[in-house]
Image (spheres, rainbow, N blue to C red):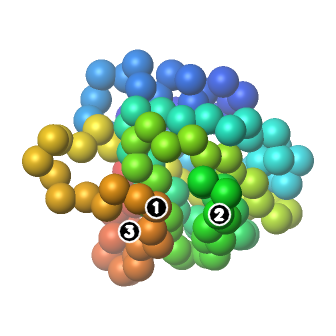
Amino acid sequence: MYLDVRPDWLAYVDEIPRALVAANAVATLDALEQSPRHHHQKAQLLFTVRGVVNCEVDGAVWIVPPQCAVWIPGGLPHSVFGSGEVECLSLFIDPPETANLPKGCCTITVSRFFRELLMRA
């Protein structure tokens, strides 16, 4: 599922009855500066295609350069901002209870194969 980027689109992520939701965002610094602190029940994998995205979580800032990603567990308040024009992809995942996924934020090494899967989603 693809979501159009609009100011309130994050409010609807948890309402989509799918285990996986993909979203693509192309924005300038001004648009990303307006990203309010928010949270969603679905976990988020934020992948930077171009530019640099910064994700603030629990008083720490995760810097996500191009071709890298950060994992944000569900329910964790965060905000996102960038430098200049950026393009990023987000996968919102409703993981099963038995999934062995990180409980805190962490960076993800994105292989060429995984990058292609993200771009296809």
For disc 3, the marked residue is 116
Name the amino acid type tagged 2: Ala
User: Is label 1 in a helix, a strand or a loop?
Assistant: loop
Alpha carbons under labels 2 and 3: distance apart: 29 Å
Q: Nearer the viewer, residue 79 or 60?
A: 60
**Pointers 1 and 3 in contact (C-beta within 8 Å):** no
Residue shown at 56% from the left, 47% from the top? 24
Q: Nearer the viewer, mark 2 or mark 3?
A: 2
Alpha carbons under labels 1 and 2: distance apart: 10 Å
Residue 61 is situated, as x and y percent measured from the top left of the image, at: 67, 65
Residue 27 is left or right of residue 110, and the answer is: right
User: Is label 3 in a helix, a strand or a loop?
Assistant: helix
User: Is label 2 in a helix, a strand or a loop?
Assistant: strand
Name the amino acid type tagged 1: Cys
Outermost residue toward the front? 59
Q: Is residue 108 above or below residue 75?
A: below
**Pointers 1 and 2 in contact (C-beta within 8 Å):** yes
Residue shown at 33% from the left, 43% from the top? 93
Q: Which mark is residue 60?
A: 2
Image quadrant for the N terminus?
A: top left
Say whether disc 1 or disc 3 marks the residue closer to the N-terminus.
Answer: 1
Alpha carbons under labels 1 and 3: distance apart: 23 Å
Q: Is residue 3 above or below residue 55?
A: above
**Pointers 2 and 3 in contact (C-beta within 8 Å):** no
Count how many numbered circles sit on residues in the image: 3
Q: Which mark is residue 105?
A: 1
